[in-house]
Image (tube, rainbow, N blue to C red):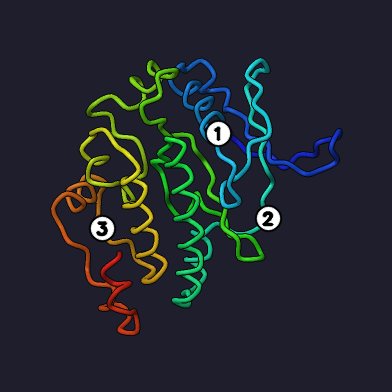
Amino acid sequence: MGEVYLAEDLKLLRLVALKVLSEEFCQDDRRSARFLLEAQAASALNHPNICTIYEINDDHYPPFIVMEHVEGETLAEKIKAGSFEIAEVLRLALQLAGALSDADAHGIVHRDIKPANIIVTHRGQVKILDFGVAKRVAAESDAETQHDLSRAGFIVGTVGYMSPEQARGLPVDARTDVWSLGVVLYEMLTRHTPFAEATNSDVLAAILRNEPESLRNFNSAIPPNLNASC
């Protein structure tokens, strides 16, 4: 929905990431609401593995969000570059699970956990980005926005990482993010997604009907307990 720029905060003398809503979406009320929701959802969280939001300015045209500048690679880039040691996968998974647990404690479901939305810093710390499709569970203050973004039959998220309830357009809760985290772990361990099909429709059908191939078919060194958890 936007473009991200590296910027300098001239008052605090620090680098920041500036996410600007694309002009083509500024007149789209639904996308504007989603952009605002991203800042509201992420700013409610204070966790070392979630990218910090510093400011939102929706008085400016186009609106923008100022967020923490994180140096590193996306998890998608790291997966593409090569395989992970099992110990590293578990170390990153613990960080991601902690961040999602904190989001759940604040009543927030990310709904788009995937490698492209996760940055791994040079020190091995993960940061979850992009709360643009996040949902506040049972939040009365943004009920109208949630009706628009989460109405029955309206699918939100990235197809290959969706939970079955997401794929069916049903209400979601924190278990959706747990499912998506499992898909991410599967991809980290195998460099394959568990529901890889030719079209998005086929992927959705596979999520609803199929069991993914065992991790140990890709790597017999994967412990049985880890295989079961994914």
Marks 1, 2: nearer the viewer: 1
State the residue position of label 2.
Answer: 71
SS state under label 1: loop
State the residue position of label 3.
Answer: 195
Pointer 3: residues within 10 angstroms few (<14), some, or many (20+)? many
Marks 2, 3: nearer the viewer: 2
168 on left or right of 70: left
Pointer 1: residues within 10 angstroms few (<14), some, or many (20+)? some
Across and down, in percent, residue 88 comes to 50, 72
Residue that appears at 60% across and 61% down: 125
Across and down, in percent, residue 107 comes to 42, 35
Q: Which mark is residue 44?
A: 1
Across and down, in percent, residue 197 comes to 24, 56
Which amino acid type corresponds to the residue marked 3 in the rendered image? Phe
Query: Could you tell me how far apart the alpha carbons at marks 1 and 3 are, in whole angstroms?
Result: 33 Å
From the viewer's perspective, is residue 30 above or below residue 2? above
